[in-house]
Image (cartoon, rainbow, N blue to C red):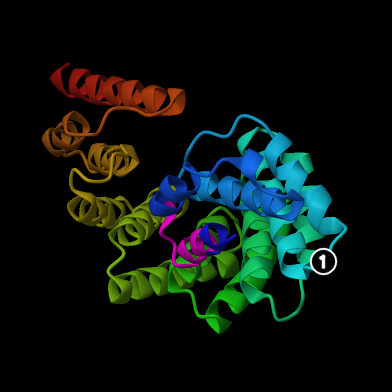
Amino acid sequence: MAALTQIDSLLQKKDYAEAVKEISVIDPASLDEGERALYALLLTEAEYKNYDPITSDALINQAVRYYQGSNDREKATRSLLYQGCVYEVLGEPEKAVDSYNKADESADRRDIANKAYAKLRLGVLYQGYAVGAKKIALEKYFEALQLYRLLPDRHYELLCLTNIGAIYRDFKEEEKQDSALYYIDSAIDLAKKQNEEFFIFSNLYHKAEFYELVKRDYRNAKNYAVRAIRIGGREIDHPRAHYCAAKSYIRLGQIDSALYYLNRSPESVSANDSIMYYNLLADISRYKNDHES
């Protein structure tokens, strides 16, 4: 069906919103078995990449069953890949890891894009969920990074560099802390070349946190936090850079500046953010009481 081929082309061009729009007008009842499998795969991929809600694995499982019995290796790999994405969205990380590993193992060596994305998603899961160690996440990110440099895909290269720097930042060994700065700075340089403001913001914030939490160098911490805030402006709705700036100014005894950034922080997006906000208010209050008594 020509319409499905066109939608697949839109996905390759990363025009996800248009792909969702185009596929929404297709009646799956009018399709034959092979077309329904492709429809299921493309709709799942389009919705996932467009951040549309996904509430069931039934659709993608149709595609997986069909393509595992076909000669289309790329679609077989891709259906497993997006099955993993669906399980990730549904909060089933162990199933997602299994699907991503199968996608990675089944991919043709020339299928760099799907293989790289499977490794990237494995890295995200191992980094953020209790399914394994951060060292495995690093391994997967490095494998994905190499592949994204081959493609090349600078956006996903940036994502790998950013996450590698964030993981190294949390290690206690000095050698790994040096690696954290190397990968954070590499990400900032590439983000500037690609004009990717979100990644500039993220990595400046990671650098601020590194100086705050690891080095206890509050002067550098507040400098990088303030730079992140200026890059992000009102477009990036995340309060942590403001909190880092406020905390660093408290440690430096500059309470007016701490209050300035705390009062201008975006609204908390999680319970942890709210706790951090009220802890910082309490720190400011204690500092004022100590210096007034």
Q: Position of residue 168 (x, y in %)?
A: 56, 61
In screen coordinates, is 224 left or right of 44?
left
Q: Is residue 176 magenta?
A: no
Q: Position of residue 173 (x, y in %)?
A: 61, 62
* Residue at the image point whose x is 14% and y is 19% from the top: 292
Q: Main secondary structure of the magenta part?
A: helix
In screen coordinates, is 170 left or right of 196?
right
- Under tag 1, what secondary structure? helix
Residue at label 1? 105
Three-letter code for the amino acid on which mark 1 is drawn? Glu
Q: Is residue 138 visible?
A: no
Above or below residue 223? Residue 177 is below
In screen coordinates, is 74 left or right of 293?
right
213 or 11, nearer to the observer: 11
Q: Quadrant of residue 123?
A: bottom right
* Residue at the image point whose x is 67% and y is 31% from the top: 56
Magenta residues, start to end: 6-16
* Residue at the image point whose x is 28% and y is 39% from the top: 237
Q: Is residue 187 visible?
A: yes
Q: Position of residue 8 (x, y in %)?
A: 54, 62
255 or 41, nearer to the observer: 41
Q: Residue furthest front?
A: 30
Q: Is residue 13 magenta?
A: yes
80 or 169, nearer to the observer: 80
